[in-house]
Image: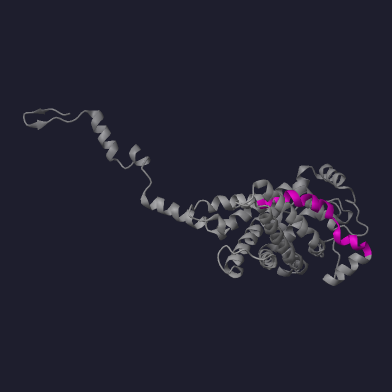
Amino acid sequence: MSEVKGGSRLPSSPSASTTNVQMQSPTGPAAVARPPQPADTESFADFREWISQPVVAAFCGGGVAGAVSRTVVSPLERLKILLQVQSVGRDAYKLSVGSALGKMWKDEGWRGFMRGNGTNCIRIVPYSAVQFSSYNFYKRNIFEAYPGQDLAPLTRLVCGGIAGITSVFFTYPLDIVRTRLSIQTASFAELGSKPAKMPGMWATLIQMYKTEGGMAALYRGIVPTVAGVAPYVGLNFMVYESVRKYLTYEGEQNPGAARKLLAGAISGAVAQTFTYPFDVLRRRFQINTMSGMGYQYKGVVDAVRVIIGQEGLRGLYKGIVPNLLKVAPSMASSWLSFEMTRDFLVDLKPEVSQAAL
């Protein structure tokens, strides 16, 4: 305390004065460690409220699921594409899965396994996000008579099909570029000598737009794609939710992680097997005007006629083996990462009931 002499107060000690100044200064330690202000708390609460909405959470979860699943199976995905575009006279990859992967590694190294995966992830994040979120949107706002209604399998099929078509139209140009990137460094004699530096995603996109017919070139093959995606996505959602419900034991709200993985693997295998010929047609049309690799099909019917005539019915199922090998890890990791991400985001809002998912 300060002392009083002759009616006047002596100044306080320097340390006390310094302490007082620091406490009053807006830039002192007390200001740096200030407690959260009401506005900050309210903004964070609003963000949690927004991101925990089912459609938003499904959008984010779908993006994560797409990136994770495609990266896990990138080598098998590229091998599948190379096998799909092989027709009569092209047998560079007419090998067993193990031998073909070995050839890919010998020719291009680990980059060969991941060729086109960056573009695929850029495509698949919005593709999966739009697919999962639109499925949830259509399910809640069109097909459910009341929140949380248990939909019939056929209704899930239709809802999933519409969601698949929605996602395809948003992201198809990136899909066709991904196919070109996967093929341009392959060991096909028709491609000739490889340039020192291969064009990237944007260069390929711009080149196609300028030299192959503008926007129509970026949507080449959209008809067989939509014809295959609608039943594929519909079957995927229908089978997954049916198997998931079957694997949910009495008294549980959701099955465990292992049972979710199993449901995802089964749904992916069923959906891809039934719709695989459409995937082969999609890849063939995507390179229909590619120098040295084009097939010059006149339409979907003509493509089916030529493939069966020259390659037999097996031609419509080229690449099915690596495709089925990748289905289990791809779909399982996709559904697991989707549900984990979605559930985490939805749980940010404690009052939201999991039963409504």
Q: How many marks?
A: 0
Query: As drawn, which residue projects farthest toward the front?
Result: 250
Q: Position of residue 328 (x, y in %)?
A: 75, 50
Query: How far across and down, in percent of the image, does residue 45 sit?
Result: 44, 53
Quadrant position of residue 157? bottom right
The answer to whether residue 195 is magenta is no
Residue 282 drawn at (x, y percent): 79, 63
Tell me residue 131's x, y (percent): 65, 61
- Is 63 left or right of 105, judged from the image as shown? left
Colouring rule applied to residues: one colour
**Rendered image quadrant of residue 315:** bottom right
> Residue 329 colored magenta?
yes
The residue nearer to you, when weighing 237 against 224, is 237
Q: Assign the C terminus to one quadrant of the image.
A: bottom right
- In the image: residue 99, left or right of residue 337: right
- Can I make out residue 15 in this image? yes
**Residue at the image point whose x is 91% and y is 53% from the top:** 91
Asked which quadrant contains residue 127, the reply is bottom right
Assign the magenta stretch its main secondary structure.
helix
Q: Which residues are magenta?
A: 310-335
The image quadrant where one finds the N terminus is top left
Q: Is residue 214 left or right of residue 347?
A: right
